[in-house]
Amino acid sequence: MGFLLGYSKKEITPQVPISMAGYRPLREANAIHDSLYLRCIVIKNEQTEETTAIISYDLIGVDHLIIDRIKKLLKEENIEIHHFVLSATHTHSGPAGVLNTMRGPLKDMSDFFGAPQMSLINHIAQITLNALKESLDTLQSFRIELVQTTFNNIGSIRDDKSSRTDPHIFLVRFLLEDAKQLLLYHFACQASVLGESNNKLSADFPGAVLMHNRTEEMIMFLNGNAGNINTKTFTKSDTYEQNSEFGRQLAYEMGILMKHPDYIGELFEFEVRKFQIELKRKQVETFNNLKETFPISYQIIRFNDRTLITLPVEMTSEVMEDMKESHQVECICYTNGYDLILTSQESFDLKRYEALMSPFQKGEAERLIHHIAQNI
């Protein structure tokens, strides 16, 4: 069984001035510090002809407003993509107006995320279509170098600075037939080094990593279970200088790790399976007019002997700790939707910020993890 890979990188930076998402109240961006992008990788199974699109957006989130329009455009072009992994880096210095704050878990949260701006959403969907078409036109054979390990000093728990965060990191370098290289890196960290005083559009630390890594043709970041991880405890300030230093350190660490990969060879297994579970909602005034349960869709991806889980939420780091150790999985959050935070029963007991912000009842995160474990 063989696989082919195509890729594309497209700029999605909107014009300024524009409202910025991520802090309350909304800020106005009056300049652009570094450009925002979408990065696309398409993997095609030569035997089954199944195609999977993995796309990372320099946005606060990606939900059905963008996803549905992408699928509609693909249908109009008679292009079939079987599986989608559409993920946001969760930068807090990107544009507002890309998420649905009219209904669902983000209802009445336009002061955080902005009211939907359909012109911007349609623009991003059209650029995504172009990226997918370009990726499908450049399919080629490839090999991979893979690292799955741990490293620290990337922040701490928001309410407990002495606690360790999720130290897992997953790196894949794609070595293409045309001699170009792509790097995909995945770990759990809030893309919010830059604070609420920032008034320039920026990809935050994923953008800073790029400034210090010029080896690969394209570098894609997929965020993890970072719902309670705060980079502010790692950095001395929220300036662009500090952000650059953070990016430099991370790029250096990844460069060292990729010198000694765990595996070099073919991608011999790549399979995506989809699942769904109904999770119970809180019955509080903040989340009124909602159904008692809400469907959460997730994917289990087999990548050689590794397992990746995609979730449409901000999962907090401690919830998946045991599963990561026992099942050797990595969790890609902010993917195929954005339904706010899922957090542990302990977080509810301690009345932490994540529990207050979560639209789900106590114990639902653990129930989701149990559901995932049964399907791995």
Image (spheres, rainbow, N blue to C red):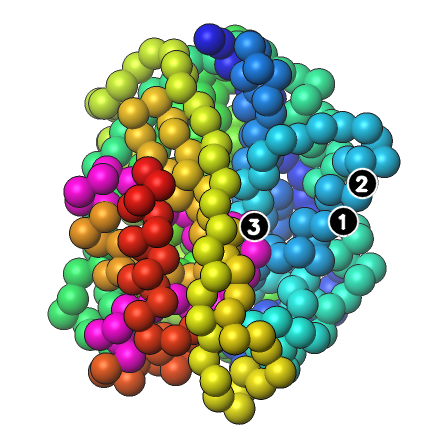
What is the span of residues highlighted in magenta in the rendered image? 324-348
Dot 1: what SS?
Answer: helix
Nearest the eye: 372 or 256: 372
What residue sits 50% from the left and 57% below the top? 296
**Residue that label 2 marks:** 73
What residue sits 17% from the left and 42% below the top? 326
Mark 2 neighbour density, 10 Å: few (under 14) some (14–19) many (20 or more): some
* Marks 2 and 1 in Cβ contact (< 8 Å): yes
Q: Is residue 7 magenta?
A: no
For residue 90, say whether it is visible.
Answer: no
**Residue 107 x/y as whole percent:** 62, 77
Give above or below for 233 relative to 257. below
Q: CA distance from mark 2 to mark 1?
A: 6 Å
Q: Which mark is residue 69?
A: 1
Q: CA distance from mark 2 to mark 3?
A: 17 Å
What residue sits 52% from the left and 75% below the top? 292
**Residue that label 3 marks:** 336
What residue sits 44% from the left and 71% below the top? 280
Mark 1 neighbour density, 10 Å: few (under 14) some (14–19) many (20 or more): some
Give above or below for 119 relative to 51. below
Quarter location, residue 132: top right
Give above or below for 143 relative to 280. above
Dot 3: what SS?
Answer: loop
* Marks 3 and 1 in Cβ contact (< 8 Å): no
Q: Earlier in the sequence, mark 3 or mark 1?
A: 1
The C terminus lies in quadrant: top left
Nearest the eye: 134 or 247: 134
Q: Earlier in the sequence, mark 2 or mark 3?
A: 2
Which three-letter amino acid code belongs to the residue tagged 2? Leu
